[in-house]
Image (cartoon, helix red, strand yellow):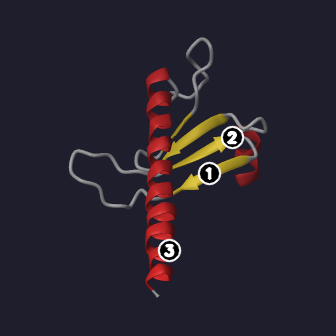
Amino acid sequence: EDDNMESLLGPFLVDLPIQNLAVRDAFRPYGCRVHFDAEQRATAIYDYHKQQLIQPPTANGENGNHNSNHSNWEHAKMLAKCTMGLVLTGRDHLLGCHMNCSNVVTM
């Protein structure tokens, strides 16, 4: 099944499954999986919270996936950007720089 998905959506993916991270009321959960083709173009984004695979619409606005209109694709791209920003800022920068580096400096 994974090989079939890889051939359809591309050979590369970035998986950010942080959908269980608590968020404030009225905010949507983070978490997505972004698929890329061999030319590094996004071919699909899986929204873990909605449990939907969203693909970019074609020139005529359709590609056979009912979740793939322009609005859904733009929303999925923003989800991917926000999720990646949180992962990079929260884990890599805050923990890596501020916590680890500050421990070295104070010793």
Check disc 2: other Cα within 10 Å, few if <14, some if 14-19, many if 20+: some
Is residue 85 shown left or right of residue 13?
A: left
Q: Residue at x 36, y 50 (%)?
A: 29
Residue at which label 3 appears: 101
Q: Residue at x 38, y 61 (%)?
A: 20
The location of residue 10, given as percent across then percent down, is 73, 41
- Residue at the outermost bottom position: 107
Q: Could you tell me the amino acid type at mark 2?
A: Phe
Determine the image quadrant of residue 7. Answer: top right
Distance between mark 3 and mark 2 Cα atoms? 34 Å
Residue at which label 1 appears: 14
Distance between mark 2 and mark 1 Cα atoms? 8 Å
Residue at which label 2 appears: 36
- The earlier-in-sequence mark between 1 and 3 is 1
Count of labels in the image: 3
Is residue 86 shown left or right of residue 46?
A: left
The location of residue 49, given as percent across then percent down, is 40, 49
Is residue 50 shown left or right of residue 22?
A: right
The reply to whether dot 2 and dot 1 touch (C-beta < 8 Å) is yes
Q: Nearer the viewer, residue 107 or 12?
A: 107
* Secondary structure beneath label 3: helix
Q: Could you tell me the amino acid type at mark 3?
A: Cys
Check disc 3: other Cα within 10 Å, few if <14, some if 14-19, many if 20+: few
For discs 1 and 3, the disc positioned in front in the rendered view: 3
For discs 3 and 2, the disc positioned in front in the rendered view: 3
Distance between mark 1 and mark 3 Cα atoms? 27 Å
Determine the image quadrant of residue 43. Answer: top right
